Amino acid sequence: MTTGTLTAGRARFRLPRRQIPVLATLALLLVMYGIGVSQYQAFSNVQVIFNIFIDNGFLLVVAVGMTFVILTGGIDLSVGSVVAMTAMVSASLLQKGLPAALVLVIALLIGPTLGLLMGCAIHFFEIQPFIVTLAGMFFARGMCTFISGSSIPISDGFWTRMSQERIGDPRGNFVSISVLIAFAVVAVAAYTLAYTRLGRNVYAIGGNPQSALLMGLPVGRTRIAVYTISGLCSAIGGILLSFYTLSGAPLIAVGMELDVIAAVVIGGTVLTGGSGYVFGTVLGVLVLGVIQTLITFDGSLNSWWTRIVIGGLLFAFILFQRLVGIRYK
Amino acid sequence: MDDTILEMRRITKTFPGVTALEDVTLAVRRGEIHAICGENGAGKSTLMKVLSGVHPSGSYDGEILFDGRPMQFRGIRDSEANGIVIIHQELALVPHLSIAENLFLGNERRGRSGLIDWNRANADAAELLASVGLHENPVTPVIQLGVGKQQLVEIAKALSKKVRLLILDEPTAALNDVDSAHLLGLLRQLKAQGITCIMISHKLNEITAIADSTTVIRDGRAVETLDMRADDVTQQRIIRGMVGRDLDAFYPDRVSSPGEEVLRIEDWTVRHPTQDRMVVEGVGLSVRAGEVVGIAGLMGAGRTELAMSVFGRSYGRDISGRLFVHGREVKARSVAEAIDNGIAYVTEDRKRFGLNLIDDVRRNVSAAALARLARLGWVNGNEEIKVAEASRREMNIKAPSVMAVVGKLSGGNQQKVVLSKWLFTDPDVLILDEPTRGIDVGAKYEIYTIINRLVAEGKAVIIISSELPELLGMCDRIYTLAAGRITGEKPVGEATQESLMELMTKDKELVG
């Protein structure tokens, strides 16, 4: 991005093709925000945007992990269950009186371990990611109810502080610590994808796995890595969710994986892999958040309208990607 | 003139930028076996696709007369309805369905209720199988059969469609000797039943053994039709028709001064990844610094398979043999290891195996040797752009910038990107598989110039090519490959198109 103009002098100005989907999402977001501001006076309040991040911080983190997976052309259906399992494990261990620091470490290890195992199954046994992560999804969800059939409240001091701490400006706008953590995850992920060999390999494998193999790229290692990264992001997401709700519940975040996939795709990442950006995923999550907020502001609409709108948008974006022709065959 | 079942008159078929067939006329007598032969890319398959309606009527010029009536096929269904059935080299069976299910796919045996009558289907299937000499239970899934038997199922399927003209594209290319012999016997039997057969083949011994007439196609033109019954037409006679492509194409001059041996393989043997047959058998060859060595071979000779198996075992299984780089034996069990040992392989199918088409020039150039631009896993983006820019200049890649998406470039420029990518790995040996396929004349010359420059810098180059003039124009030495074996090695001064083609068509069962 920084050096894109180095040789562009002679070329006619053209929208960079790979970035068109992201720009379309940005335009959509601005239009939706504009509608909100024109309809509701309170919508222009900065806190509205901050609240979107506060309410969706965990979703953003999980979506970042999913972006890695989808960029390689894979899919991870286990994320929602891993989020719930992480929250459940944390709540249950805290209830047993373990120190917060130890609980954090354990909770942050479970997700990536499961991701690593799924990645290995996908690579070594050449099983489709869909079915492997579906198994992972059932397993993690089952573990939740195994730990406890009902919700476990969290009263640990560290957790409540993380939940209630407000970081704000003098005018009274604020975000939670979770939002900062989410931003940090986004930043690290964006840099990894853009500036590291791992990131390059992710794009290369998604763009053309066969030629990646014939270039000597570590296809297997990279595949395993992305599922591990997705597992780690789900674990972080689970911790953030437990900060947010101060509990672990066996049936929380059911179907979240589908929201996450929707956010990534609306954010311009191509489902077949090889093209997309973390920044787009941030926009995708924001689109979902703004839709929710608009419906809340309206007050008369059922919250299920969020789903209907997301369904329409998802379809429109996939159609759009087809038309822009991100594939050259 | 004899009773003619098929006449194709003045067929011309063009694709964007190339004329695949020019004014081809073909006449096939009723009840004969008519062989079609020619070099790779001569236009044999295109002609058969025109005949079977894969290229529909209207997409080509000329006319087709079948049984004296003009035909305008809009698709395979039309041609099959008239009794013309084509069996492609890649068999088109559904692996997990049974033989009977495959035989009647799209043509199911229905009972009175409109549902499929499986009893009848299996009974009919058993009968068809018997007629092709295949003794298998019709309920056996096709995936459990070997290629030879699958081929027979395809023929049985054709028979079920009341075939009158059967077209076989390289039917024995993937078969072992026993299966080949059985298939040829079956073709004779079908001929006795009055079924006309067109067979595309590279195996001249098979053609001389079985064909009644042979049409030779060269560069999209039907050169001649030989009557195999009348004259005593020899394999040499057919070869003379196949080659003789003009040598007027221009190749840049190069002073040859080979140095030390860089790469040598000994007794290299490779088994097919899924089938039980050897694709490469006991091959030995070597290449020296500053030398260009050619590998000539027809389709299915194992050229690409040989190259890819040497390149980090990226093809085949049970690979045995020894590989030496600079006189030292190396293992090179993975592509990464091959690259580390200074071997680079430029694929014949750059779109599928050589490039990430949806990414830009810069990242394609750097992809194979990203480690050179990275420290502790972090890629130096500025350095990367410099490298890509340098390649763009040196290779004369015509792209608006190094940020241009590779999928948008022309074939020649894509190939230059692939070459840039491999040169950035700083190889000692470059294996170039069909380096000028699908590239226009001007870009070809540029690629040749680049090759000569690399050789002058002391790199060793192996060129695999279907174009004999290209090999004769570029190489110092040429190996010929047939059915996975080296059948000859000639210094370029002693090689002619005829002598190479003779070696390329030399099969192991010459006695047959």
Image (cartoon, coloured by chain):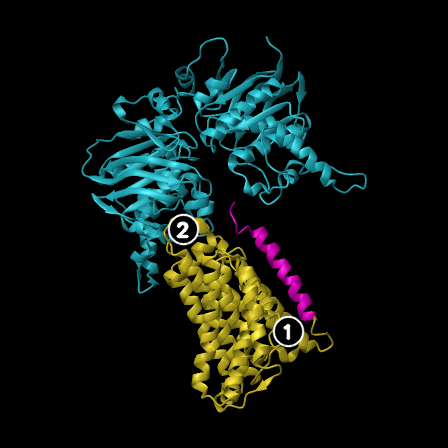
Judge whether residue A19 is colored magenta.
no
For residue B503, side relative to residue A37 (left or right):
left
Magenta segment range? A305-329
State the residue at coordinates (29%, 35%).
B284
> Element type at marker 1?
helix
Chain ID, mark 2: A
Q: Position of residue A281 (x, y in %)?
A: 52, 66
Q: Name the amino acid, label 2.
A: Leu
State the residue at coordinates (38%, 54%): A217
Residue B500 on image: x %, y %: 34, 24
- State the predominant SS element of the stretch in magenta: helix
- Which chain, by letter, is cyan? B
Residue at point 45% right, 79% down?
A: A106
Residue assigned mark 2: A213
Specify whether A255 is left or right of B242.
right
**B123 or A102, nearer to the observer:** B123
Q: Chain of mark 1?
A: A
Distance from disc 2 to disc 1, alpha carbons, whole Å, reads: 43 Å
Residue A1 visible? The answer is no
Residue B91, x across and y down, in percent: 55, 36
The residue that label 1 is drawn on is: A292
Front residue (pair B275, B347): B275
Marks 2 and 1, the one that precedes in the sequence: 2
